[in-house]
Image: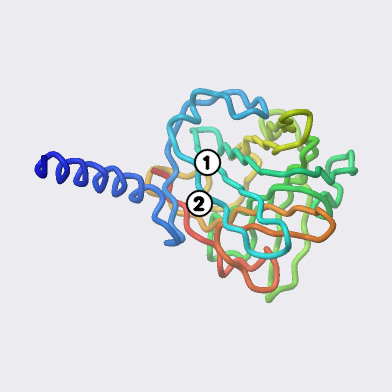
């Protein structure tokens, strides 16, 4: 009996170690698995997402302690992100792309492929599937976003979102999107290869009466604190 119990403990420890190897808790390092390309539905129901586990998006500031999680994969053509955000009130009245959707409920990701250049890519998506993709030059805290030029064809993102209700009430919302590597041209270190590292951070903002914020890596003054970004490794 004792030997069986010890064997179970060993198996649990091994499983925990294997999971921690991909997503070490609070280490600021995240390995991204490679996949074949797939369609995004805004529901996160593609089989490809079974290749990786959810990563907790820690609550950092505000009044609402909703749970937030995300997943990330990459292919030869680009990066896939999936966010699941618990929520009871959807605050999202802006109905156009390239607007200030960060002033309402939104999820965000920042990718900084080359640390030698203080330019990174920011992507935001709202619960009603409106997007904000921009390049951001940031020099000593002075930053402003630039919209993509010739945003068409294989440079376009793919994105979808859905609001989930339970017993007639909002319980969460899902954001799913694909960012093609061609959109990130001419940033260096793109497209990535196996072993390539980028700096990155993942965020959520919610506006139930007062602002609440979540981020993978903690920041100081705002989300544009690129020195505090974590590291993603293309596995």
The picture places residue 70, in percent across and down from the top left corner, at: 57, 44
Q: Residues within 10 Å of mark 1 (few under 14, many from 20)?
A: many
Which quadrant: the N terminus? top left
Query: Which mark sits nearer the N-terminus, 1 or 2?
Result: 1
The image quarter in which residue 166 lies? top right
Query: How was this image coloured?
Result: rainbow
- Cα–Cα gap, marks 1 and 2: 18 Å
Is the residue 75 above or below the residue 66 in the image? above
Helix, strand or loop for disc 1: strand
Which of these two is toward me, 43 or 232?
43
Horizontal side, residue 198 vs residue 31: left or right:
right
Give the residue drawn at x 62%, y 59%: 59
The picture places residue 161, in percent across and down from the top left corner, at: 72, 33
Give the residue drawn at x 48%, y 26%: 36
Which of label 1 and label 2 is nearer to you?
Answer: 1
Give the residue drawn at x 65%, y 35%: 177
Residue closest to the far bottom:
140
Is the residue 215 above or below the residue 162 in the image? below
User: Disc number at residue 72?
Assistant: 1
The picture places residue 153, in percent across and down from the top left corner, at: 71, 28
Is the residue 151 above or below the residue 227 in the image? above
Which of these two is toward me, 37 or 188?
37
Give the labeled residue for mark 2.
Answer: 189
Horizontal side, residue 48 vs residue 66: left or right:
left
Is the residue 218 above or below the residue 75 in the image? below
The picture places residue 57, in percent across and down from the top left corner, at: 57, 52
Which of these two is toward me, 156 or 122?
122
Q: Residues within 10 Å of mark 2 (few under 14, many from 20)?
A: some
Horizontal side, residue 160 vs residue 184: left or right:
right
């Amino acid at each position: 009996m004792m030997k069986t119990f010890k064997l179970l403990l060993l198996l649990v420890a091994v499983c925990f170690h294997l999971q921690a190897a991909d997503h070490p808790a609070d280490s600021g390092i995240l390995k991204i698995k490679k996949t074949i390309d797939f369609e995004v539905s805004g529901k996160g129901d593609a089989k490809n997402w079974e290749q990786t586990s959810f990563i907790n998006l820690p609550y950092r500031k505000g009044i609402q302690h909703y749970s937030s999680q995300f997943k990330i994969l990459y292919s030869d053509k680009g990066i896939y992100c999936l966010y699941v955000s618990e929520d009871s009130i959807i605050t999202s009245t802006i109905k156009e792309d390239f607007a200030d959707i960060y002033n309402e409920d939104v999820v965000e990701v920042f990718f900084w492929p080359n640390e030698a250049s203080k330019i990174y890519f920011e992507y935001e998506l709202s619960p009603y599937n409106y997007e904000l993709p921009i390049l951001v030059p940031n020099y000593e805290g002075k930053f402003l976003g630039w919209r993509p030029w010739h945003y068409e064809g294989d440079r376009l993102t793919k994105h979808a979102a859905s609001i989930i209700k339970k017993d007639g009430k909002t319980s969460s919302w899902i954001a799913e999107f694909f960012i093609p590597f061609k959109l990130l041209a001419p940033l260096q270190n793109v497209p990535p290869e196996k072993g390539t590292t980028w700096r990155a951070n993942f965020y959520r903002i919610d506006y139930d009466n007062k602002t609440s914020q979540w981020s993978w890596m903690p920041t100081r003054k705002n989300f544009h604190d690129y020195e505090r970004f974590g590291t993603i490794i293309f596995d």
